[in-house]
Each structure stands twice: as structure tokens, then as C-alpha cells.
Image (cartoon, rainbow, N blue to C red):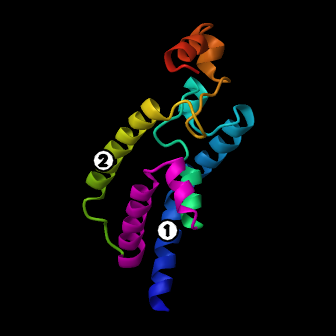
Amino acid sequence: MHKIKEVGKRIAADLYQYKWVILALFLYDLAATHFWGAFCPMVIVTGLPCPGCGMTRAAFLALTGNWALATRYNPAVWMWLALGIYFAWNRYGKGRKAAGLMYLMGGAALVMLAIYFYRMAVCFPGEAPMVFREENLLGKIVPFYNEVLRKLFGI
């Protein structure tokens, strides 16, 4: 029971320390989804999927046991979930820093970029999340932007 209290205290301390970041992300989510119908700044601005597109859905699907669909939404989800578990186990379970976490995250980011470029070459445009969003800011600002992307990607 003592161990559970310690874990709870660590989680509460982190939530308190990052309360303004959490609030800012919550407000950004409300505004972005209200005004643009999307959360991702890259999708909002360019209309193109980002390397993390589909990650939230993939994580939810993975955590609810729908592993095949999670992998289809974003295969990088498994690296990030593993890193999240590694971080949480060390930070909250053991009360220490997760050794080498920044290097591991950097490696995961590079792998995620490789997966993204592969998906852009092979899967784009295709099923969600690898779709082009016509209602993007650049398309509204630059008259020929969407047309160039249509020709470039065969959209």
C-alpha cells in the first residue's frame, strides 16, 4: 500500500508541475478541432499527414486489444508505447530517471520518420490517416497549392 501511495504522489506532482502545459494542450485541442476539425498542425497547415498521424487512434486501439488495426493506423505506435512503459516504470514505479530515454526517443523518432516516408511513398493517398485534407490553410492562402499537390501525389 505504501508503494501505491508513492506512485500516486509522483503522478500528482508531475500533473501539478505540468498543469499549464496540460491546460494549453487542452485549449489548443478545443480550438483546433472547433476551427479546423483537426488537431495536427501539419494537417491544418499543409493538408498532408504528419509522421505521427493516426498515433492517438493507434494507441487507443493497441490498448484495447485491436492490434492489427493499431498497426495499420501507425506502426510506430509500438515503439512509443514501449518507451512510455519504460518511462512510467522508471519514473513512477521506481522513482528514478529512465536511463538513456532521450537517445531511445531520438532513435524511435528516426524510425518513425523512415516509416512515414515509406507510407508517403507507398500508401499516400489512401486510407485514413494517410489522406490529403483539402481544407488546409496553405490551400486557402496559395491559390495553386492544392492543385500542385494533386498533380504531385496523384490525388
Secondary structure, mark 1, is helix
Residue, far right: 34
56, 76: nearer the viewer: 76
Residue, far bottom: 1
5 with respect to 32 (left or right): left
> What percent of the width, then of the height, locates residue 49?
53, 34
The residue sitting at 57% across, 25% down in the picture is 45
Q: Residues within 10 Å of mark 2 (few under 14, many from 20)?
A: few
Which residue was labeled with disc 1? 13
> What percent of the width, then of the height, locates residue 38?
65, 37
The residue sitting at 38% across, 44% down in the picture is 112
The residue sitting at 29% across, 55% down in the picture is 104
Residue 130 sits in which quadrant? top right
Mark earlier in primary sequence (2, 1): 1
Q: CA distance from mark 2 to mark 1?
A: 26 Å
Q: Is residue 68 above or below residue 94?
A: above
138, 16: nearer the viewer: 138
Kind of residue at badge 1:
Ala
Kind of residue at badge 2:
Gly
Q: What's the mark number on residue 48?
A: none
What kind of secondary structure does the magenta stretch mostly adopt?
helix
133 with respect to 84 (left or right): right
| Magenta span of residues | 65-94
Foreground tag (2 vs 1):
2
Q: Is residue 96 above or below residue 146?
A: below
Residue 118 sits in which quadrant? top left
Residue 4 in magenta? no
Which residue was labeled with disc 2? 106
Q: Residues within 10 Å of mark 1 (few under 14, many from 20)?
A: few
Residue, far top: 143
Q: Is residue 28 above or below residue 121?
A: below
